[in-house]
């Protein structure tokens, strides 16, 4: 499975957009990019995923570069409740015949400041 | 409500005393997995299961066992716990067309 690289920490002002980068230069053609976040010691929460097109849902937007070697998670209007560790992982979507051996990096600690 | 349920939430035990952490999901997911989380190391996969009776090692399987006799349950067994297994444990499930759903965690302390 492809591994990911994220900055260890980032800060963002409340109400501004938070842009969290992720490098996944060894991603293969059938691997999706997933983003999760973990608030304090709760179970990680799914945010969004995508293959090659940009994606948007009620929580965030995901921008994937054309060569798919990196992506950016965008929280358009960060709030204090968005303070969390954000994880980027790659996973084969629909792994029938494959494996679910997933590798989480150390993530990015996002702090949203008032 | 769709959920992954782990029990117990907190557990303190002594070295060598066998324990089981249960995990159950109500979403009919094929895939289930266990992770441990330690400060500075992030989430590391212990074991995963592709379906009933199909399990495989993750990155840190030593000292753990799992079983998948039923689709909804995936217990984590520590036959002889040691202090280095003190950690926060998460169970997760998913299917072909869904992302991982995580449980709320089990904080284990082995003294």
Image (cartoon, coloured by chain):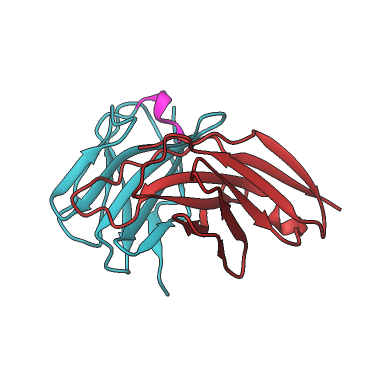
* Quadrant of the drawing holding the N terminus of chain B: bottom left
Between B35 and A55, which is closer to the camera in this rendering?
A55
Left or right relative to A68: residue B20: left
Between A4 and B91, which is closer to the camera in this rendering?
A4
Horizontal and vertical percent position of residue B108? 44, 39
- Give me the chain that's red: A
Direction bottom: furthest residue = B1
Q: Is residue A78 magenta?
A: no
Residue A60: quadrant of the picture: bottom right
Horizontal and vertical percent position of residue A14? 82, 56
Left or right relative to A82: residue A86: left
In the rendered image of this protein, does residue A53 appear above or below residue B109? Answer: below
Between B9 and A107, which is closer to the camera in this rendering?
A107
Q: Count how many numbered circles sit on residues in the image.
A: 0
Direction front: furthest residue = A66
Horizontal and vertical percent position of residue A62? 58, 56
User: What residue span does the magenta drawing correspond to?
Assistant: B82-87
Residue at screen point 15% across, 48% down: B54
Between A86 and B62, which is closer to the camera in this rendering?
A86
Can residue A110 be seen at all in this image of the molecule? yes
Residue at screen point 68% across, 58% down: A75
Horizontal and vertical percent position of residue B34? 35, 44
Residue at screen point 21% across, 40% down: B56
Can residue A42 be seen at all in this image of the molecule? no
* Quadrant of the drawing holding the C terminus of chain B: top left
- Give me the chain that's cyan: B
């Amino acid at each position: 499975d492809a591994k990911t690289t994220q900055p260890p920490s980032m800060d963002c002002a409340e109400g501004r957009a938070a842009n969290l980068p992720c490098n996944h230069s060894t991603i293969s053609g059938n691997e999706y990019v997933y983003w999760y976040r973990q608030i304090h010691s709760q179970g990680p929460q799914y945010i969004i995923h995508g293959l090659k097109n940009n994606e948007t849902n009620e929580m965030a937007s995901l921008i994937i570069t054309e060569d798919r070697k990196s992506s950016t998670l965008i929280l358009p209007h960060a709030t204090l409740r968005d303070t969390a560790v954000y994880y980027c992982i790659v996973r084969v979507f629909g792994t029938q015949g494959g494996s679910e051996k997933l590798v989480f990096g150390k993530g990015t600690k996002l702090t949203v400041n008032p | 409500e769709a959920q992954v349920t782990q029990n117990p939430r907190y557990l303190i035990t002594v070295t060598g005393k066998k324990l089981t952490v249960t995990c159950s999901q109500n979403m009919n997911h094929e895939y289930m997995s266990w992770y441990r989380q330690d400060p500075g190391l992030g989430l590391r996969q212990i074991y995963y299961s592709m379906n009933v009776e199909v399990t495989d090692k993750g990155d840190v399987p030593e000292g753990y066992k799992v079983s998948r006799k039923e689709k909804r349950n995936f217990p984590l067994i520590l036959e002889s716990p040691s202090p280095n297994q003190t950690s926060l444990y998460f169970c997760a499930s998913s299917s072909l067309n869904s992302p991982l759903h995580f449980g709320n965690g089990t904080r284990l302390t082995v003294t």
